[in-house]
Structures are given as C-alpha cells and as structure tokens.
Image: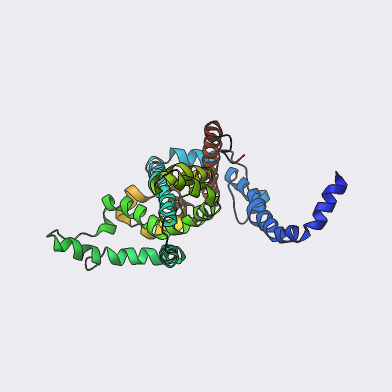
Amino acid sequence: MKAIAFHRMKMHWPLYVMAIPGIVFLIVFKYIPLAGAVIAFKDYSVFQGFMDSPWVGFKHFKTLIDHPDFARVFGNTLMLGALKLVLIFPVPVLLALMINEIRKTALKKGIQTALYIPHFLSWVIVGGILFDFFSLSGLFNIIIGWFGDESVLAMQESAYFRPIYVLASIWRDAGWGTVVYMAAISAIDLQLYESAMIDGASRFRQIRHITFPILLPTVMVLFLLEIGNFLDLGFDQVYNLLTPMTYNVGDILDTYVFRTGIQQAQYSFATAVGLFQSVIGFIMVYTFNKLSKKVSDDGGLW
C-alpha cells in the first residue's frame, strides 16, 4: 500500500505542490489564530500579555448575555440572518436556472457580466450609492414625487432598513453567487435534455425534472455553508448602511462588538462574542447536516 501511495504521489506531485500554498494559508490564518480565542476566558491586558493575563472563566459571556442591549442586538442578528437565508440565498439559484435557458451566447454572457460587476464594488461604495439614491434629491424621492408622495429619508427610517439590506445584498452578490451553480449546470449531460425533448418535455419540465434535481446537492452544500455563517452577517455591509436612527432594527452582534469591544479596547469581550457566534454556527451546521443526510444519502458535508 505504501508503495502504491508513494507511486501516486510521485505521479501527481504537481498537484501536491499547488496545494501547499492553500495548506499554509489555512494553518497560518485559520488554525494558529484559534489559540487567541483563549483570551475570551481571560481579562486580557496588552501590558500583561497573552500568557500572564488573569483567567476569569465565563465572565465575558455572562456580561454579554446579561447586557440590556443583548436581546435587541441578538434579535436583529437572527432576523437579518433569517432574511439572508430565506430571501437572499435562493436568488442565485433562480438566476442560474433562468440564465441557463438563454440560448443566445452573446446575450447570456452580457447578462452574466452585468450581474457580476456589482460584486467588485466594496460595501463602502455601495453604501455611498445607496445614501445618494435615497437622499432628498435622490432618484428614489424623485420617483415617489411623480406619484404625489412626500419625500422621505429612507436610510434614516427603521422601516426601510431591512428591505434596503435585502435588496442591496441581492444587487451586489446574487450575480456572483450564480458562478458555482452555472458550473454545476454546465456539467449536466446534454443527452438527458435530448431524451426529454424526444419525449415531448417542455423547457419548464426539463428544469423541474433534470436541471433542478441534479443541481440540488450543490444547493444543499452551499446552504449548509451559509448556515455556518448564520450569525456572521458581514460587519462592513451592515456598518455602512447603519445610522443612529436605525440601530433598533440594524444593530447586530458584529457592529455591537465593534463599538463596545474594539473601540473601547475590550478585546476579551469582543473575542467572547466571536466565539459565541462560532459555537452557534457550528451547532446549526451540525444539526442541518444531520437533517440533510436524512433527506438525501448524498446530502450533507460529512
């Protein structure tokens, strides 16, 4: 067996060499920093250092849960996480199915490019565009003015924050999210479609009985990966859309940690919140992975 393994490694040595940078990246930036999570159980002081700071057990976790803002911040995080899974996650799947039905190659590539471009804009730029779009002299107020409605500062109104969050996420990232699905669709055997057409299946029935069932395992894997980031909504996105008037519906764990943990140099508290998010994310991935394996033998990440 060792001889066979050595022979295979010798044959495929370029692949192993190409894998080295990725492995080094994981070790340096993903595994080694895990040791820093220990300061969540300490009163970390930059003067005493990583090793000599006193142990305090679960003090920072208790502080987080007992804090009067915790229910509001945690509730907002859960709400935006649920919106992300229910409204934002399915959009790339639908886009990929629709783009796949376009027969003219030039039109197909043009639509794909138009959908990809917003992903390369940072959330700082997207936030600036949105604040300008919803300003008193912006396009939004010009349009509602045509219908006789009064101008409104939507970015300063709590009622508009979550719809804007969802629409901004879809506009910026839905097109980029189709990349994996389009790759999975392109691997489907064309003979399946030819057989279906001979049997008289319409385009909709081909999508329903061929494309979507074959795409489903990929959707399930990406859904499980998304579940793992359920409480990790992306600090830069929410922070660039948030205003003091929308804190009651938009303040999430990430922005709360930035204000109370980073700006006030409470590094142990900030680490405790990050660990809290990671543990909940792991529990959710484990639970949904179990459910996925019950639904499909090929489902699940492991």
Q: Quadrant of the C terminus?
A: top right
Query: Would you identify the image quadrant in which residue 67 lies?
Result: top left
Give residue 56's position: percent from left, percent from top: 59, 41
In the displayed structure image, the side of residue 104 where residue 180 appears, left or right? right
Q: Is residue 263 visible?
A: no
Q: Nearer the viewer, residue 240 or 224?
A: 224
In the displayed structure image, the side of residue 12 where residue 288 appears, left or right? left
In the displayed image of the protein, which residue is found farthest to the left?
148
Colouring method of the image? rainbow
Q: Quadrant of the N terminus?
A: top right
Residue located at (82% from left, 48% from top): 5
Q: Is residue 283 visible?
A: yes
Question: In the image, is residue 3 above or below residue 293?
Answer: below
Residue located at (44% from left, 46% from top): 206
Residue located at (46% from left, 54% from top): 234
Q: Nearer the viewer, residue 30 or 70?
A: 30
Question: In the image, is residue 289 above or below residue 243?
Answer: above
In the displayed image of the protein, which residue is found farthest to the right?
3
Give residue 226's position: percent from left, percent from top: 50, 46
Give residue 161's position: percent from left, percent from top: 31, 53
Q: Nearer the viewer, residue 47 or 129?
A: 129
Give residue 296's position: percent from left, percent from top: 54, 34
Q: Nearer the viewer, residue 206 or 53?
A: 206
Query: Would you identify the image quadrant in which residue 73 lies?
Result: top left
In the displayed structure image, the side of residue 34 where residue 122 appears, left or right? left
